[in-house]
Amino acid sequence: MIELISVLAMFLGGCALLRTAGLRGWVLPGLGLVAGVALYIAIGVVQVVTPVVPTSPILTLALTAALPGAWWLWSLRRGRAVGVSAPLAGLSVAAVAGAVVLFRAVSLVTYHSDTFTYLMASRLLADDAYKTGISTYLVTNRVLGMPLLHAPANLVGDYYLQSISPLLALATVVTVVWFIHAGAARGLDRATRVVLIAAAVLLLVSNNRFVFNAFYLNGHLLQGALVLVVVGCGWLLATRAARDSTAPMMALQIVAIPGLLVTRPEGPLVTALALLPTWISDLPDRYRALTMAVAGGYGGAWFGFQAWVYADRGADLPVSVLGPLALSVGLLVGAGLIATGRLPRIAPPVDRWALWLAEIGLWLALFALAVREPGNLKQSVVGTERNILGGDGLWGLSLFILGLLVLAALAVRSPRREMLRFPLTTFVPLSFLLAYLREGAYHAGYGDSLNRMWMHVLPLAVLFVMVAAASVLKPKGEPTTSPGATDRGPVDATVHRGDLA
Amino acid sequence: VVAAVVLVAVAVNLVQFAGIERDSPANVGAIHQPGTHDLRELMYHGCAVRCLQRYGVSIALGLIAPGSRVVVPDSGPLTADRNLAEELFVELRAFGGVERIDVVGGDVTARILGAVDPTPHILASGAGGTYGDPWAIAVDPARGPASRGDPPDFIRRSLQAGVRPDRTAPAREFVMVRWNAVDLVLETSLLPADLAAELRS
């Protein structure tokens, strides 16, 4: 019963949030679940970092459902058009409830040794023993996203929710479909659009490791979903392709930021790379400042909490805590400067140069570390080659072929494609850099960190390929997006000025 | 052409799916139906060596006496390494269901081990290895469980019998010390009353 309540609380909370923001139609249940999971994590983080407030998942679930629910009711009473079809809403709830029952009945689960350390943190959260009992190792290495997600199961003596990962996998597929439908496939005829969407779905669900991650007790699928949402929403907003969904996309992107920060140890770096295209885009200043403030605020709170744990346990503060803390302070300052108009907008085409400079910077940093310690990179490359091509990583040839498709897609121009490309291509140097910052080099084997981390960009890679495919398939001269959102050149920055008013 | 390229990628995915499943250890295959969702059983069947070496003492304590209090003398080797002690305490809380852990001052380890021979009271034990030290749990026979067997077989036996932590049972108290290179969890009611009271205070 607690599993059903937990999933429905996240589902209904997320749906209420996005519906009140203006989203409607078939996509609402899928994006609603993603938004609900993200909101649940965002609330859970606040509970963890706030003194005195208990970390009980009951409170997290109640707030996840109640806060957006109250906003929805308030909006409805004020006469805003946020109503829903009662039969369809009932059908959606019944479908989610049915899926929970089904996934519990079939009891599919995959796991390995890391799983248990994440679930230890989960138990402490549920017992309200996290703040006093968490170790310095776990608080920095087995971070909050996945433990928070499964914490409710501990209320009845279980350690994990059996249905949330497969449901999140389904919602991730729906999210990819939505981005293609709303952004890339505009201007295509119905048949081509259907083929494109079917191809994306098949590319994901036929991939053995995607299915594995759908039942895997770890944070990789969650991270992949959040990367997709943060990057995809930024791209969709910048292309102006889905004007009627501007506010929901803003809400979804913002609510996903905390989760992206706290699901992996490298969360702050990934968040910065995922949001950099948004921050230097031509989206309204207030929106760019808000996303930056959320990243800086949540980052500061979470790593401030980590610093407190280290101090409380009498341990020295590591760079892995101090660095993100400094980054968070920088983001808060940046947000303040943007909001007050003191940070001038980077005009095109310099904004695109900034992305290239950032990417080149990552490669140069990797080069510098490789010169100093070549063994690490060499071992990582050899291990990764065996995982991707040699079968050790259990990917078969899927990742290699998808990589080829991404390379081919890089040659295709599409509106604002750099917003999708940048977080995808920077994943490679960032990952190999992380090998220098963590315990050691990557190695051959399915349990290797990088081998599992490819899931973080798998849905985004499929989206990137499909966006390129849509561009190729579009008739010549077909406007792909709203005026102003071009492959290059300035964009009308006033288009969305009213969205946050 | 675009459709054909993607179709080839999908076809490759599908063709190799079953092969990958065959090559995968069960717990990391895409479709794994272990027949249980009990985490202890998953650990036992899918992570036996590593998990039982590392978490065995906590799992066993959770099956015997969830909700217990564990006292750890500060002077002993268990707390000498702060990081290892932190990890141990998290494991005891998470998998052992330990409600409270108290680190107490004073050199009481020698007095504890001099006061009682734990050997006849050992209910569960593990050999240790790369991922953890050998361990043993000695319980007061008056407080159960009544049925006993081979201590190294305790976890397997309990899981097979469907034993679940009884959170309604009265909380019990243990002290954890290093005994002949073994991490010993000893029920304090086995100790002389004054020593048990000293630990309690």
Image: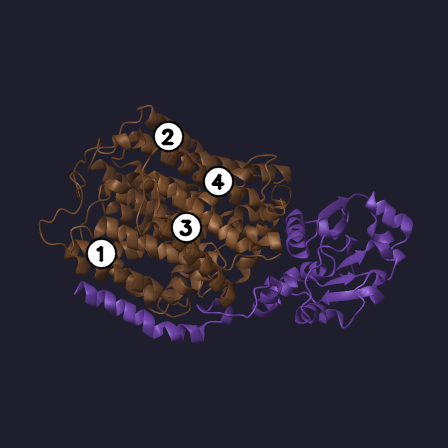
Do the residues bearing badges 1 and 2 touch, measured as CB atoms within 8 Å?
A: no
In x, y percent, where is residue A159?
58, 57
Residues under labels 4 and 1: Cα distance?
43 Å
Q: Earlier in the sequence, mark 4 or mark 1?
A: 4
Q: Amino acid at mark 2?
A: Ala
Q: Does residue A128 lie above or below B136 as drawn?
A: above
In the displayed image of the protein, which residue is found farthest to the left?
A: A477
Q: Is residue A227 left or right of residue A302?
A: left
- Determine which residue is flagged by label 1: A409
Chain of the residue where label 2 is placed in the rendered structure: A
- SS for tag 2? helix
Chain A image colour:
brown
Do the residues bearing badges 4 and 1 touch, measured as CB atoms within 8 Å?
A: no
Asked whether B152 or A107 is in front, the reply is A107
In x, y percent, where is residue A131?
61, 41
- Determine which residue is flagged by label 3: A33
Residues under labels 3 and 4: Cα distance?
15 Å
- Determine which residue is flagged by label 2: A335
Residue shown at 30% from the left, 63% from the top: A203
Q: Are marks 3 and 4 on the same chain?
A: yes
Chain of the residue where label 3 is placed in the rendered structure: A
- SS for tag 3? helix
Provide the letter of the chain coloured purple: B
Q: Earlier in the sequence, mark 2 or mark 3?
A: 3
Query: Is label 4 or label 1 in front?
Result: 4
Q: Does residue A465 lie above or below A19 as drawn?
A: below
Query: Is label 2 or label 4 in front?
Result: 4
Q: Are marks 4 and 1 on the same chain?
A: yes
Q: Is residue B39 left or right of residue A322?
A: right
